[in-house]
Amino acid sequence: MVKVQIYDTTLRDGAQAVDINLTAEDKLRIAQKLDDLGIDYIEGGWPGSNPTDKRFFEDIQALSLKHSRIAAFGSTHMAKHAAENDPNLKALAASQAPVITIFGKTWDRHAVEALRVEPERNLELIGNSLAWLRPRCKELFFDAEHFFDGFRANRDYAMECLKRAHQAGADVLVLCDTNGGTLPCDVRKICDHVTKALPLARIGIHAHNDTDMAVANSLMAVQAGAVQVQGTVNGFGERCGNANLCSIIPTLELKLKRQALPKGRLHLITETSRFVDEVANRVPFARQPYVGESAFTHKAGVHVAAVAKDSSLYEHVQPEKVGNLRQVVLSDMSGQANILFKAKEYGITLEKGSPEVLEILREIKEKEAVGYEYSASEASFELLMRRALGMTRRYFSLVKYRVLDWKQTGCEDPLAEATVMVQVGGHVEHTAAVGLGPVNALDNSLRKALVRFYPKISEIRLLDFKVRVLNAKTKHDSGTASHVRVLITTGDQTDTWTTVGVSHNIIQASWQALEDAVNYKLVMEDKKKQQGKC
Amino acid sequence: MVKVQIYDTTLRDGAQAVDINLTAEDKLRIAQKLDDLGIDYIEGGWPGSNPTDKRFFEDIQALSLKHSRIAAFGSTHMAKHAAENDPNLKALAASQAPVITIFGKTWDRHAVEALRVEPERNLELIGNSLAWLRPRCKELFFDAEHFFDGFRANRDYAMECLKRAHQAGADVLVLCDTNGGTLPCDVRKICDHVTKALPLARIGIHAHNDTDMAVANSLMAVQAGAVQVQGTVNGFGERCGNANLCSIIPTLELKLKRQALPKGRLHLITETSRFVDEVANRVPFARQPYVGESAFTHKAGVHVAAVAKDSSLYEHVQPEKVGNLRQVVLSDMSGQANILFKAKEYGITLEKGSPEVLEILREIKEKEAVGYEYSASEASFELLMRRALGMTRRYFSLVKYRVLDWKQTGCEDPLAEATVMVQVGGHVEHTAAVGLGPVNALDNSLRKALVRFYPKISEIRLLDFKVRVLNAKTKHDSGTASHVRVLITTGDQTDTWTTVGVSHNIIQASWQALEDAVNYKLVMEDKKKQQGKC
């Protein structure tokens, strides 16, 4: 069976969702992650249409992707001038993207009412645009916009659009259900018609989820012979979103036995899904098939015993295959298993059922109840474990801090100043620093106070800072009085680590995360010393 | 075409989800709402299995439902004694529910490994349970648990289970994809086999969403002759959830032209979906097909121009048909069309291409380039527009604010205190307030300063506070020095609105959003006055 091409448009169609707002930096990080997963094509955006996408296509060339090819997206040239003079087509060629995807109208009413050109002229736009781009890229795809609606409205015209694109050299004709209203049975019929009428053409599918059918429609098209599936991570996209690649890829590989990713990559799909949500600052959807947090969650009882004996009794696939975890709700044993698993990772030996383990378990449950989240902040988790086991010394302790924000009319940014008083051994150090904001000032001040005692501190750098407002638990606990969770990612020359803090007060939550970030560095240095690495 | 029976199991299978907790009171309110919508069957739970369900079946009889029939759910009787002595079957009969649904094993391995009975004995349990219940209820349904997996593993046995249930008097044989791993093509094949083998039986479908196919599978079964669809509102349920009735019902009626609800009820489905989320205390999923907040939201400028011309060009159905609304949001992709559309909404008349429009467009693009995001903060957008057009007066202006966070070892939360000096007309007001965090303190202090001049301020309440750290745009601009975007949602008795602020400094970003939030309230009050509403 021929491999199915996976074409990701999270960075273009996905980014058109109301609640998704990606910077060029975000897009580059996601592209890197998709390359690790082994996605064949990554559609980066519209070159030249806006500064973000312009920068993406410049900077992506510095990343040396191992598997993925970058695709630039644009429309057929404007009717008022020829292809060779069209600024958009020129921008596409200038983007240096090896793959170019052009979308064109295939529904005659759209040509007339949206594009305001005669249907015949629209056919020329399609043919001329693709013909001009053909020698200017390695691969050329045609997104047949509104194809399914167009086919139902005026079959001959829609088919003629495909023929022109095929003749002009499109490698794949991608049938788009732009409005997302088509049902699987119609997708099947229409794909069959196209493959019969254009036996030499290769077709793809681009589905939207307006009837909750995007995944079913995509797989139906593959079963009808489509060689390319376009979609987004987690189904991001306008309105109801695009076809969800996190559902399509596992079903292709595990159920339809079709290769979609390079061998041995499928288990990366859950972490990819979570990563993209994190970068887009979206709360992951727990019920998401295959990759969701509840996708393999079982309730305690006979059920669980049966799952333990033979998971195929209650699971349609094994969670490990997609890199997800089986969870048993309200089961301390599963909690313990995690702790023992992690301890081993950290080189700590613990005994199942031992008082230490139960103590750590109690503390974690207590912390998670008020909003701490250790899956995304393992450094704080390791520190918690080491403290519970008396495996780390106290490097410093806070006496007090004070953060001041002073805004005066006239000056754009307020003055942010922090003072920190910490005790290190016998000494009390009292320092002050300013910053671009209160947390930055606090961070500068803390490191200034400690560097004299721990010079290695000068090696660390704050790489990322994330804030999530936890949902109000009571009526009082809402708005600006909500709990906030702060995640801080820190790095030195060799490692990066993430720490967490939670409080009503964003400054206090940030302080906790900063404190852990510095402590973790010092713990690592001591570990290295013990291992004689310094 | 025969009407499709809609069987809702939100209160039973839906409530089994880890994150759903319904009281008897909640269940009664939802049942009432489902009756208003015109759902045929409402499965209330397991009578006698727990106090909540026990109370539900008692109290539901006081509610005089206009359309829906209440169903009680339970399993085949225990192997160790006869049907007539089985406490669960007795509880079902005692529930007074006009409809009883019994589930039984149809996968031989499950009979042996989970129930621990011989396959032959399991067939007796099915037959005896249904035969005993038949005279004790108006309608009797059989949920064939794991039917699709069972059919694949041992077709003859799975079919024999159905035959026994049919002979024992089940009105509908509901084929369950309990593990949710079946694909539409297999649902079709297996349903066709069953309808051929049991031409006199009526079949139903109960699908789970573990492959993102629950909706497709349900509709496929209907196309194969199923007369009953079981599912839940918003797809609630264990793991990946059950088939989502909010997607299935509109597709049945609008696309497959099959009646699912009483005439003229479909437009109630959006409010039903939101109501159930509300009662279950779940944040609605914005991308949910048909009923989601973004389901008919248009963002890209090119779309908006066309939608304004003819909505069928970009919408697969009209939002009014399902009681949802069309929305147009703003983004850096937005062109003039969006602005004109919005202005009209705000009751402002603008001319395409006019200097005002171009000025507003320029300002939006400038702001969005540094991280402002108006699609999620329309109140700030309206203020921006009114300011550009000189359509709002200055209610107050900041002289200075100062925010202090003071943390001392020993006390858990730091002290957060804010002072604000604002000028209102000739007066200068200088106030101070504390809060649970610096932003809360600033918020309290600002409103304290203004309420004397604008008593209506006392009506507003902060509902939500969102912080998004924008990823580094330059190498220096990273970590705790990143730009942050703050979104604040505010409400009074009648409206809610969202405002935005962006800065290196989270306090300053929050200040901007707070300032807009208060200004927007004052603008609305003036509008009301002009319209003589006060």
Image: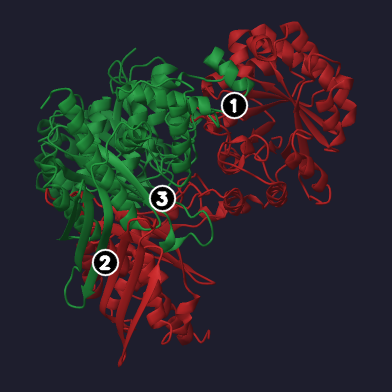
Chain colours: A green, B red
> Chain for mark 2?
B
| Residue A466 percent coordinates (x, y) | 30, 48
Q: Residue at x 34, y 21 (%)?
A: A344
Given residues B74 and B273, the one toward you in this image is B74
State yes or no: discs 1 and 2 in contact (Cβ < 8 Å): no
| Residue A49 percent coordinates (x, y) | 19, 51
| Residue A77 percent coordinates (x, y) | 19, 46
Both marks 1 and 2 on one chain: no
- Of the 4 image quadrants, the one containing the N terminus of chain A is top left
Q: What is the spatial separation of the Cα atoms under label 1 and label 2, in whole angstroms? A: 48 Å
Vertical position of residue B484 compared to residue B423: above or below: above
Q: In which quarter of the image is residue B522?
A: bottom left
Q: Residue at x 31, y 90 (%)?
A: B425
Using a 10 Å C-alpha cutoff, classify the residue at mark 3 as few (fewer than 14 neighbours), some (14 to 19) or many (20 or more). Answer: many
The amino acid beneath tag 3 is Leu
Secondary structure under tag 2 reads helix
| Residue on which disc 2 sits | B508
- Of the 4 image quadrants, the one containing the C terminus of chain A is top left
Secondary structure under tag 1 reads loop
> Chain for mark 3?
B
